[in-house]
Amino acid sequence: MSGWHHAPVANVLLTTGDVEAFTVGLTLLGSGGGGNPHPFRQSLRRALDAVGGEFELRDPADLGDAPVVATGMLGATSVLTEKLPSGHELRDAVHALARWSGTAAAAIMPLESAGLNGLLAVTTAAELGLPLVDADFMGRALPRVDQFTAAATGASVTPFALVEPGGQAVLIDHSSPRALERIVRSVVAQGSGWAGSALGPYPARSLATGACAGTLAKALLLGRAHAETGPEAFAARLGGRVLAAGRTVEIARIPSATFGRAGIAIVDDGGAVLRIEAENEYLLALLDGVPVASCPDLLCVLDRRTSDPIAVDLLRPGDDVLVVVLPGPPWWRATPERLRHVDPRSFGLDCDAVLLPDVA
């Protein structure tokens, strides 16, 4: 297999038997963030059972100019496991957006096909009885709405609807990406810590090039490969490589007004030291001080006993881990202008992107 990011987009079916692999793949695409999809696996099974046990992941190019709305949870997604959603927030955000724009959604897609939001897009589309578009605005987990592909291309990132757990809806229109990021965070911080959101609509055919197409299918491929092989073989099979295998010896967490930072030190079995810089996601890896991998490629820290991915906020000193890097979404590396939106410097780290070779 030459690389995971050239998986076919059209005619991929997600079935009830794929739930575990799909969940693991979404977690890997989270690169340490994206919210934990595991508590919502049963909701996904129920949604798939309700539509006959399978759901097609649709190629956006096949849907013409059908209006597509992107959905996702924003805010402190870790709070969702303590303060569970009602299950209607995303649906209500889609309906609020339709009332504002005057255009009903003809299909649903995730804001990000990683972590929690990749899974919830499936359940939302199934609940609304709408097709699910296999595309998203990030291609992996990223923390900010001004890092949508739509923002990078100059497309509109409004109207944008937020629905809080209590049912209150907030509509934002005519906003720049950076202003939208500030407004969204303010609403969430002053509310319940998280909110369901909807963005659009966008003509489906525009998403074939204006978004990261095929990411849900990639999550399924990642999860299947993870289940079928050992972690080192898994990384090589998907065009990635192992960066270190050893023990976490230090985690320095630095709170901030935004997402916080973490500096992680891992001593490899061979004696080398791998340092990882992280926010919500793992962003940059340096081996004995030399940068060896970075976003937008996927930095994944795996439990060496179980091969399970470990989130940034769950990693602890003493953990026995394997650190791998997998190819990130090709959309971001297509031009230097795009890459600047998601490289280490976009997170305030003084380092250029260090990417795996393009396996195309």
Image (cartoon, helix red, strand yellow):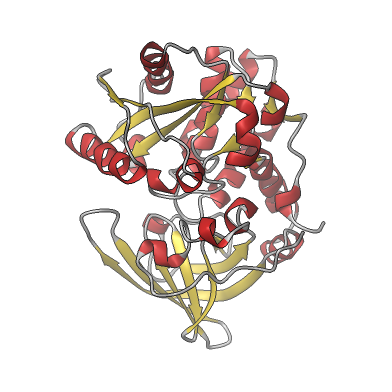
User: Where residue 273 appears, x then y in whole percent?
Assistant: 48, 83
**Residue 198, image quadrant:** top left
Q: Quadrant of the N terminus?
A: bottom right
Kindly tell me whether residue 231 is visible in this rendering.
yes
Kindly tell me whether residue 59 is visible in this rendering.
no
User: Where residue 245 appears, x then y in whole percent?
Assistant: 57, 74
Name the residue at 31% across, 63% down.
261
Q: Quadrant of the C terminus?
A: bottom right
Name the residue at 66% across, 36% down.
208
User: Where residue 312 appears, x then y in whole percent?
Assistant: 41, 58
Say left or right for 325 vs 84. Answer: right
Say left or right for 14 vs 190. Answer: right
Above or below residue 18? Residue 143 is below
Residue placed furthest toward the left: 190
Residue placed furthest toward the right: 1
Front residue of 156 and 294: 156
Front residue of 110 and 268: 110
Say left or right for 35 vs 205. Answer: left
Say left or right for 20 vs 153. Answer: right
User: Where residue 147 appears, x then y in whole percent?
Assistant: 43, 48
Above or below residue 301? Residue 20 is above
Front residue of 25 and 303: 25
Above or below residue 178? Residue 100 is above
Name the residue at 60% across, 68% down.
355
Count of labels in the image: 0
